[in-house]
Image: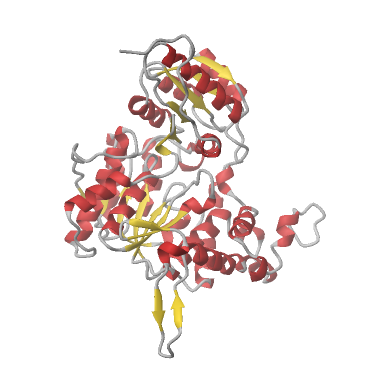
Amino acid sequence: MTPGNQDEHPQNRQSRSQASPDQWTLDEAFRRFESRTNLERGGTPRLRQYRLNRMETLLQRLGNPHAGLPVIHVAGSKGKGSTAAFTAELLAAAGHRVGLYTSPHVTDYRERFRVLTGGREETDREETDREETDRDGNTTRDASPEEILLNESLRVWNLVPSLEQEGCPPDELPTTFELLTALAFCAFTSAGCEFAVLETGLGGRLDATNLCKPILTIITRLELEHQDYLGDTLPEIAREKAGIIKEGIPLITAPQRRDARRVLALEAARLGAPLLRLHPLPRTIPLTLGGEVQRINAALALEAYRELLRRKSVRQAPRQILEEALTRTTLPGRGERLADLYLDGAHTPESVAQAVRTLTRPGSVAILGVVDGKDLRGIAKALRPGVSRVIVSRPGTFKPGDPRTVFRTLQEEGLSAELIPDPGEALIRARELNSLDRSSCREAPPILVTGSFYMVGEIRRLALKEPLHAEAPPEGTQPCH
């Protein structure tokens, strides 16, 4: 798109002017970031859109904020966000200041950026005030993580109009995810983080996070996913994920299928990267995040901490402190229990089957929203063992999805389904169906919300806005004894 094009989007014209600090807010920052090419929205797959030269240019112009930041880099198909969160909590529990970068967000872009220290997340000014007195007797206060995000987002964004004014071709301008990743590097460095835990966005080899300097890499469970971008077979997808493995840097991997495991092992051997053995998480450690897969993710994080401790890269913490850190770890939309809901953004047959197996019981109600390009029949078959009634709804508007196609597929696969495109009405109907279980003198299981993070985000917003209040049993029912 060239200057003066009559069809040019107004947001792109706006990007040619520097943003004013006086009118800059984080919401405005994320709106402008979103105005760039956003590959998370999908569209026509073009692998050439994923390349690292744009990110290299962006980071160079920002002073290479990633260069001195030790990173634990996490890739995979399922559970990489949870694994990153577990890892960050362990490092923070050991007394380190840790930046955590995950994607996608469920309700707000701010979810992607967290700073943890001393076993808690730094959020507002009350928690993060650290006052110092300079030589002149003046008191200064460190900025809170939100203030740092605000300041750094302005610095990152103002590079976009600068690049445009220098004649940078549109295809060479940074994408939304690249801007967000650059912001993470800048914010965590400015916040004085000792470590950053980064989750890849898509794949690994060409992901914007892959310019980091890892001290350890983790690859979670691999599945068939994003085949238009990553390849049609599991070994092809494994090769893309293996792109985060670095020469001489330890690798920890979740249990994998044989063909995927072979790809990862060969790449680790080629690069001289120690491939570490994963030990099961003790059953005595309870987790807030639901699902058996989360125990594997927590085990990956604990193994990462132990390896860094062996290398004297982190402080030692008492076992009880570490176990408490794993127990309190949460991440929106990843096996999250919220009131009468289980929220899990599973979107492949294997991950949906895992959610159904560990988060439901026979006869459960589910709200399902799936974006285009997913294996609908596989997802339908994965729901069948534990879900008897499915409410099909629209997973927002961020990515295209046709609830009618999902509904027809579920019917063809023999599931009892209702089509209710409006998420608010879908939640009301799911709760109505769930109340029938209470009328039959048994506790209703949580409603499973799944199929995409976008569906989870729609329902989570509604649930937080209108919390479920305790209800009396339906009239005419008798107490259960």
Q: Nearer the viewer, residue 263 or 436?
A: 436
Relative to 348, 324 lies left or right:
left
Give x and y (percent) for residue 287. Answer: 29, 40
Q: Nearer the viewer, residue 294 or 341?
A: 341
Examine the rendered structure and indicate whether residue 241 appears above or below residue 475: below
Examine the rendered structure and indicate whether residue 399 appears above or below residue 88: above
The answer, for residue 274, to whether it is visible in the render is: no
Examine the rendered structure and indicate whether residue 392 appears above or below residue 56: above
Q: Report the label total.
A: 0
Q: Residue furthest right?
A: 6
Quadrant of the drawing holding the N terminus: bottom right
**Which quadrant would residue 30 be assigned to in this image?**
bottom right
Relative to 29, 344 lies left or right:
left
Relative to 237, 105 lies left or right:
right
Give x and y (percent) for residue 89. Answer: 32, 53
Give x and y (percent) for residue 349. Answer: 42, 28
The answer, for residue 209, to whether it is visible in the render is: yes
Give x and y (percent) for residue 241. Answer: 38, 47
Q: Nearer the viewer, residue 22 or 395?
A: 22
Residue drawn at (49%, 27%) of the image: 375
How was this image coloured? secondary structure
Residue drawn at (50%, 20%) of the image: 390
Quadrant of the drawing holding the C terminus: top left
Examine the rendered structure and indicate whether residue 53 appears above or below residue 355: below
